[in-house]
Image: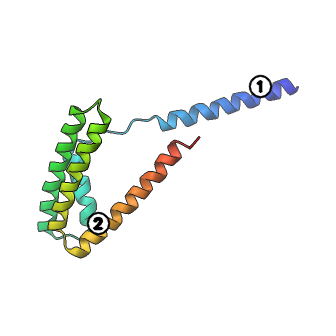
Amino acid sequence: MKKIMVIIFLMIGSLGISFAQTAQTTPREKKTPEERAQLTTDRMVKGLALNEAQAAKLKEVNLQQAKKMEALKEEHAQERQELRKEATNIHASVEQEYKAILTPEQYQKYQQNREKQVEKRKGKIHERRPRR
């Protein structure tokens, strides 16, 4: 009787583990640079209460950034360190363009939203990879 109970618990446990693994491995849909730029712009328009002129300028900046990042990822597919270095340079130049387009209040709110996103991502990373 005990053996049967142990076998049943092992089977239930292995089913739970297999379901948990398949839920985490579903691939995300890869978006085009245009789609990523539009999503970023929409999020900024909504969160920062931008006017149409600002939105149009930011959409162009976001599109340029998305295209540069896409090209960079393809170019440095194997070189992770070089990719990070170049991405940092692109993000720094985009930040300067944002600062020129947005009002000081909007830029401050943008920075606060960005910090929240970074913290949220850090939390997700720790959820996926628990420390050993």
Which mark, residue 110?
Answer: 2
Q: Which residue is at the front of the view, 84 or 6?
A: 84
Q: Residue at x 26, y 44 (%)?
A: 85
Q: Earlier in the sequence, mark 1 or mark 2?
A: 1
Q: Which residue is at the front of the view, 64 or 96?
A: 96
In which quadrant will I find the C terminus? Answer: top right
Q: Where's residue 64, x and y in %?
A: 14, 49
Foreground mark, 1 or 2, reads 2
- The picture quadrant where one finds residue 61 is bottom left
In which quadrant will I find the N terminus? Answer: top right
Q: Residue at x 54, y 34 (%)?
A: 21
What residue sits right under mark 1 in the picture?
7
Q: Residue at x 16, y 63 (%)?
A: 55
Label 2 secondary element: helix
Q: Where's residue 76, x and y in %?
A: 24, 33
Which residue extends farthest right? 1
Q: In the rendered view, would you say 56 is above or below 79?
A: below
Q: Which residue is at the front of the view, 72 or 36?
A: 72
Q: Are marks 1 and 2 in contact (CB under 8 Å)?
A: no
- The picture quadrant where one finds residue 42 is bottom left
Q: Residue at x 21, y 49 (%)?
A: 89
Dot 1 crowding, Cα within 10 Å, few <14, some 14–19, many 20+:
few
Q: Where's residue 45, x and y in %?
A: 23, 65
Q: In the rendered view, would you say 121 is above or below 96?
A: above
Amino acid marked by disc 1 = Ile
Amino acid marked by disc 2 = Tyr
Left or right position of 84 against 96: right
Which mark, residue 34?
Answer: none
Q: Where's residue 125, x and y in %?
A: 47, 46
